Image: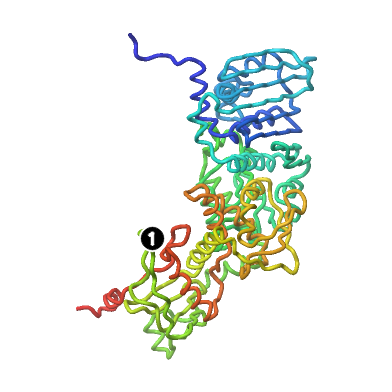
Amino acid sequence: MAKVRILPEHLVNQIAAGEVIERPAAVLRELVDNALDASATKIAIELEGSGRELIAVRDDGVGMSRDDLLLSLERHATSKLTEGSNLFAIETLGFRGEALPSIASVSDFEIMSRDAQTDAATRLHVVGGDIAEQEQVAAPVGTLVRVRSLFFNTPARAKFLKADATELSHAIRTLRTYALAFPQVAWTFRHGESLQFVWPSGTFADRLSDVFGVGINDKLLALDFELRGVRVHGVLGKRELNRRGRGDQFLYVNQRPFQSTGLAGVARGALRDWLDEGEWPFYILFIDLAATGVDVNVHPAKREVRFSDEHRVHAAVFEALRSALKGQQEALGELRRAWEPPSAPTDPASLFASGHSLPFRDDMRPAAPAYSPPAYHSSSPESQPAPAAKLRAQIYQVHAKYLIAPIRSGLAIIDQHAAHERVLYERALRSFDQRSFPSQQLLFPLLLELTPEEDATFAEMRPDLATFGFVLRDFGPRAYSIEAVPAGLRRASEASMLREMITEYEEFRRTRLGPRESLAAGFACKAAIRTGDELSLDEMTALVDELFATNQPGSCPHGRPTFIEIKLSELDHRFGRIG
């Protein structure tokens, strides 16, 4: 008996679905691809249960006849490819003919479509890949797809879905990505009973305001650059839009959204003088080139592409971003300073020979003498112990970034941001139990405007924000008035801190932390003192004191070290005093 068998059609479709449909946002992406390929000018989306219960997409595109609709549920049936040579010059978003049969095989699926040549629409109801109903109904030209009970027959796949807020966030991110590339299309999105947004057709500038809020265009630099047949155009955010998380970076090739770690690295290289340590830029980049110059058939979910001349594309992106900075005097000044040679000789011998003395640096600030923090005790076996000897004598701040203090065994070097993160993180966790984080009222409330994606995450965070001392009031669709902030917050004047907390919250949720720990970690990261913040003597003393009173003083919530110890024996060895 033969051991090799041909798999049944429904199983083949489920395998294909596993490659293409990993979550509700992937279903949404495939249905939106089809709507845009059908020349839709209006697309309406409805979700229930973050897409687990229902995903509905209605468009006013060209629609399909009854025969085409039936064929569309067959694998590898498509109107977008006619011969093999077209595969290397694809100009549509979809092309494989796998999406609809794959989705229909793992859901309760309904599709209704009508083209301009027919008087009635055809409606098909498919359950688990099998057609259960077929009928003619009255409907306008266009297509409506309803996907219910996603993964109902593949429970192993369903259990890998994340929390509702996370799945909704992915869906909104998908819609934002497409809406930015197609501003001429009107978009409507509803989740359950809530109308999330209505974005009318308009210009790219209009769409930017729709997605990111009124005033966003004043914070952007336009760019348009061409290099040997590769055009790169779009916008780069000014420095105020830089974020301490991945933030918002959007890449498109011939209006197709894609991801590329290579181009992300190119962008960071081009903007190296635009970013502080740990920051990510805001940009929306459209790359236009001949369809034959890009292969889009390299990833099951079509998230990646391959360029025939990758070096030319990378060079075009690099130069486009650099050109956007040329009009910014602040950036140019920093670039000049970065390349200026030192005005004084750097050879130690020449320094002394010319009569120079080594200056006491202004950015090396001494703290109060004879400082000694309390002894450190930890109940956690995983905690990193504090240095064996207590800090004493002088504490110095170097480059507004590190604190240096002598200890009996040598030197302790403390990262001021990471140390403050650890202090605020544990204080925030305690506040959940004690509900005692005090607030300070703002003299003038601050306006916080969120994107739909941010607002979905914010809804999950909001009940716990009051615990930290934030007082917020609804102020319109996806807009909030910040009326009070945690007492003692150093950066309380920046409404952007809450937006950064949302990004940080999502980053931590994707790792190992629960909701409250993620919120506490995001709060600590964004509220902590930063590189560049000069500390008074009392502030340095208090920071070191509080750090070594925490349960785990050795690392911040990200896992980075808060301090390092350089032993006296190592110093002796480096100076050749051991022999």
Residue 229 appearing in the image: no
Report which quarter residue 523 is drawn in.
bottom right
Residue at the farthest top position: 1
In depth, the one of 540 and 430 nearer the eye is 430
Residue 39, image x, y percentages: 72, 29
In-image side of 106 versus 68 (left or right): left
Residue in view at x 50 percent, y 71 percent: 401
> Extreme front residue here?
434
Q: Nearer the viewer, residue 339 or 197?
A: 197
Relative image position of residue 498 (x, y in whole percent): 64, 58
Q: Is residue 238 above or below residue 174?
A: below
Q: Is residue 96 above or below residue 29?
A: above
Is the N terminus in the top left, top right, bottom left or bottom right quadrant?
top left
Give the number of marks: 1
Residue 278 in view here = yes
The x, y position of residue 549, in whole percent, is 45, 70
Res. 104 image quadrant: top right
Residue drawn at (63%, 14%) of the image: 132
Q: Is residue 171 left or right of residue 481?
A: left
Q: Type of residue at label 1?
A: Ser
Please provide percent x and percent y for residue 349.
37, 84
Image quadrant in which the C terminus is located: bottom left
Q: At numbered mark 1, what does the secondary structure look like: helix, strand or loop?
A: loop
In the displayed structure, 217 sits above or below 46; it is: below
- Which residue is nearer to you in this view: 60 or 359? 60
Which residue is tagged 1? Answer: 380
